[in-house]
Amino acid sequence: MILGPTTQQGLHEKLRIITCDQRITTRTPCLKLICFRHYSLPADEQTAPRKRTFRKFTYRGVELDQLLDMSSEQFMELVHCRARRRFQRGLKRKPMGLIKKLRAAKKAATPGERPDVVKTHLRDMIIVPEMIGSVVGIYNGKTFNQVEIKPEMTGHYLGEFSITYKPVKHGRPGIGATHSSKFVPLK
């Protein structure tokens, strides 16, 4: 395996490297052929497990737990203008009914279990923090696509997560589709 200059410098700091064949040389002094059968890590790095840090979710600089505690007026200040106008004009009966059904489904679910699916035709409903963790069946014109609401979906429309068309998968062209195949006799 040939390593680039930056990788090689990092390896020289941490590893005791023995090249397989001392006679192998290259024109550029920074590249060498390294045999990984003959290296050892320092003792402290062999035992220490790597710590994985997960990225904490924030919506426009506000963390998830603060987002869930916000009032609708405070959340309204965070979202984009189109959603802000929608909230200022007030949520009508159907969107409020959906939120009530989602609350009831969450309350009925046992802790650690996914709540029941709540079906809806409201593709223009804006996802609010209260809906996070719910499972919604969003109608796409033919079927209800089950979508679990995640924190990253906040501020988007439900319809964005239930595609209304089947993406095209191009196969081979048929007979007569191109000029070269127009006069091929049909067998």
Image: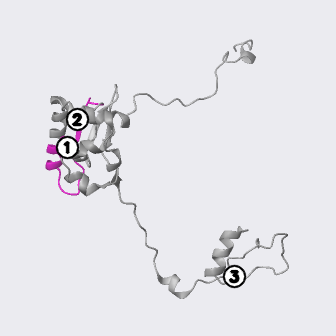
What numbered label is drawn on residue 17?
Answer: 3
**Image disc number at residue 183:** none
Q: Is there a contact, CB below 8 Å, between mark 3 and mark 2?
A: no
Residue 5 at x, y = what percent?
71, 69
Mark 2 and mark 1 lie on one chain; the one further toward the N terminus is 1
Counting residues from the N terminus, which is met first, the one under dot 3 or under dot 2?
A: 3
Q: Is residue 136 above or below residue 19?
A: above
Disc tally is 3
Compare residues 117 and 71 and report the one nearer the observer.
71
Picture layout, residue 151 above or below residue 76: below
Across and down, in percent, residue 112 comes to 23, 57
Q: Quadrant of the C terminus?
A: top right
Residue occupying image coordinates x 43% and y 72%? 51
Label 2 – label 1 distance at C-alpha:
9 Å
Residue 64 picture quarter: bottom left
Query: Compared with residue 161, is residue 175 higher up or lower down, i.e. above or below?
Result: above
Which residues are drawn in magenta?
102-123
Q: Give percent across and percent down for residue 60.
A: 35, 50
Label 3 environment density (alpha carbons within 10 Å; few <14, some 14–19, many ≥20) = some
Nearer-N-terminus badge (3/1)? 3
Task: Name the residue tied to disc 2.
Answer: 87
- Residue 72 is labelled as 1
